[in-house]
Amino acid sequence: MKDYNFLSSFELKKGVHLKNKIVMAPMTTMSSFYNGMVTKDELDYYAARAGGPGMVITAVANVSDNGKGFEGELSAASDDMILSLNSLARTIQGEGSKAILQIFHAGRKTFSRIIGGGQPVSASAVKAQHPTNSEMPRELSSEEIETIITNFGQATKRAILAGFDGVELHGANTYLLQQFYSENSNQRTDKWGGSRDERMTFAKAVIKEVKSVINEHANDSFVLGYRLSPEEIENPGIKLEDSLYFVDYLTKEIDYIHISMGSYKRTSLNDNSDSKPILTRFIETVDGRKPIIGVGSVESPSDAEEVLNIGPSLVGIGRELLREPNWVQKVQSGDEVSIRKNISASDMDQLAIPSVMQTYLKESFHSVMHFTTDTQEIEDYSNQMAPMEGIEKKL
């Protein structure tokens, strides 16, 4: 076995010991029950993968019914979900991995049919440019905003009661937390909008509420992470400098920072003259104050090592853990040659990939899943946004 840096342990916060520096990135399964409870298919999916990584971040769970983004989504919106979430936490923790529940509100990135016929909501009544069939959202009232902030706190309490090791606030991929920070989607003139600092008010309030709940109901080792997208291509919209400004604030408030990108090698999509990788820009801004998870098209052990050499503390792996659930174990045992780099559609049942997720992968992520029947060149996310970042995918 090679002496890889990513196989060494890492202390995340106040004695939170990760057995290695590999993080299973959150990936949409679309496989929960209609009400957001965990299914056996999902438990089997996580059980097949949780033994290797030091930390597993779940697929996203909504904090309120009108924050649901898609069918088959996890829910942390009511106390009825606690037992279900506990089964998920215990499954992930079974072989020593830390379990992080990712929570969010979809905002305008949903459809009325998903949320029981109601109109999607957002910071302002501004329709998203992507996807092209987006619905016009309704602007949230100040009272509704306060309720959603409370919902984030209550979802965090449920994660604590369910036995998770932490929560991650999903402020990426154009969901509600990002919508409030974006000048594109937030055109308010009250305290929730305006200047860049004023557009941070909602995220700050959510973080304050969640930390208050953690301080009251969890032990000192409960982890709070935040995921963000570095750029929007809309104009006006979030630019890289805006995200670096925001992440400087985050270093004072949360326990780790998780960047959402399709490739760890990507440079700015808005400034072609900037050849420095976005991940490097975040490393320089954070300057060691908090751990960063580097993520995006990490497949081989050399990829994972290259990410750590750039400067993050942890490496997120997503699609490769779908193809090879035992990726970490095979590297540890010196059996790299047997790591599955491609996937056959006929093997997905054997790999414990839920059937609905199989369809999702074939349709929305076909060009990057390395299907053995695909004769086209594998798509490279190093110079473009991935579909999960809010850009409509042409299939």
Image (cartoon, rainbow, N blue to C red):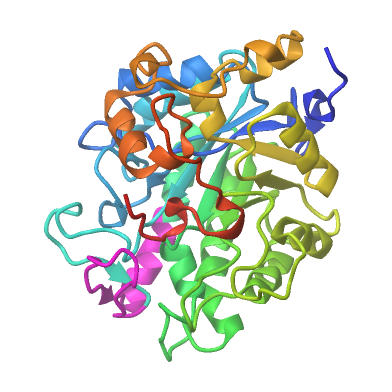
* Residue 109 lies in the magenta-colored region: no
* Residue 146 lies in the magenta-colored region: yes
Could you say which is closer to the camera, residue 85 or residue 294?
Answer: 294
At a point 32% along the width and 61% down the height, the residue shown is 109
Image coords of residue 193 (percent x, y) = 47, 84
- Quarter of the figure with residue 6: top right
Could you say which is closer to the camera, residue 112 or residue 353?
Answer: 353
Q: How many marks?
A: 0
Residue 167 visible to an observer of this rendering = yes
Q: Which residue is outermost to the front?
A: 375
Residue 266 relative to residue 350: left or right: right
Residue 315 relative to residue 288: left or right: left
Residue 260 visible to an observer of this rendering = no
At a point 41% along the width and 86% down the height, the residue shown is 187
Task: Read off the magenta span.
Answer: 124-151
- Quarter of the figure with residue 248: bottom right
